[in-house]
Image: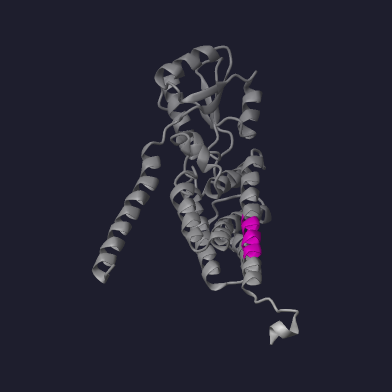
Amino acid sequence: MNTTQRALAVGVGAALLQALMLIAFAWPAAHIAPRDLPIAISGPQAAMVADKLAQHCPGAFDITNPADEAAARDAIENRDVYGAVITGGGAPRVLVASGASPVVAQQLTGIAQMLSGEQAAPVEDVVAADPDDPRGTAFGAMVLPLVMSGIAAGVVLSLLIPAVGGRAIGLITFGIAGGLLSMVIIQTWMSVVPGPYLTLAAVAGLVSFAVSGAVVGLATAVGRAGIGIAALTMLLVGNPFSAATSAPEELPQPWGAIGQLLPPGAVASLLRSVAFFDGAGATKPLVVLIIWALAALALLGVGALRGRRSAAASTPVRSADPVAAV
């Protein structure tokens, strides 16, 4: 392939990558809508309200019926539902949790207006988002830098540090330092995520390790092709389907569920649980991140074993026979 052909191939490849990125990032955002979104409806008119919602928004909600308002509030605070409709004693009241998802809270506010027929429908924010970021814009925007920095760190470690042990040290250092520094910026300068600093820093450090570890681990186990596989997976699948700006149930399925099995989606859910819900609902995303971190270490181990076998195979065997040696 001459220079002209190579240039044409690179140009076409870059255009295809650009098209793929547009699809990956724009398509989920253009199709945000509730799909089996968990909400609660309580009170004497619960069945009537559920029927009304089913008529106006078929397939949008997964409805449960707690015994009373207190049980509905507990379900919201435990992250079992995103909101609740309380009936009885006048117009239905709606409970929302903007800390779980400002987008869903806005949608449920619209439902309150539909049910009551009034613009100023009774809505209570049970678990509010940070007052400095009421729409969750900054919260959603901080996930991409965590992912991109993790990819960058993984690429640099893979290309500049040949020893597996050195790569592991670099990953651990990046995870600790990155988590501590990023949360200092997010909590003090930006002030958009409340909660215990060290716990949130540990979450940020864990996702930093998981993302960079995926890049380094695959590069160590399968070669430089692993860098591209891990980076594209995190960037083109993990980030746009992380639901950091909405909710997993708002994205086209099964992509919303798949996004929660990747580090970007897991860290968004885990940060919300720690920052706004005192850890409720944190188990699943924490397990996902730990599995990714352990998988990274396992891939490093595979690469180390492969390197030792290659070194042993390339070492010449000395003969024990002195005559043969001569």
User: Where does the C terminus fall, quadrant-wise?
Assistant: bottom right
Question: Residue at (57%, 63%) from the top-left corner?
Answer: 220
Question: Residue at (66%, 38%) from the top-left corner?
Answer: 280
Question: Residue at (36%, 39%) from the top-left corner?
Answer: 30
Q: Main secondary structure of the magenta part?
A: helix
Does the segment drawn in magenta span residue 304? yes
Does residue 246 sit above or below 96 in this rendering? below
Does residue 278 sit above or below 12 in this rendering? above
Question: Which of 292 and 182 lies nearest the eye of the viewer?
Answer: 292
Residue 102: percent from left, percent from top: 49, 39
Report if residue 212 is visible in the image.
Answer: no
Report if residue 250 is visible in the image.
Answer: yes
Does the segment drawn in magenta span residue 303? yes
Left or right: residue 298 versus residue 122 is right
Name the quadrant containing residue 59: top left
Residue 4: percent from left, percent from top: 24, 68
Q: Which segment did they paint magenta?
A: 296-306
* Residue at the bottom extreme, as displayed: 326
Left or right: residue 92 versus residue 308 is left
Left or right: residue 295 versus residue 10 is right
User: Where does the N terminus fall, quadrant-wise?
Assistant: bottom left
Name the quadrant containing residue 7: bottom left
Does residue 165 sit above or below 148 in this rendering? below
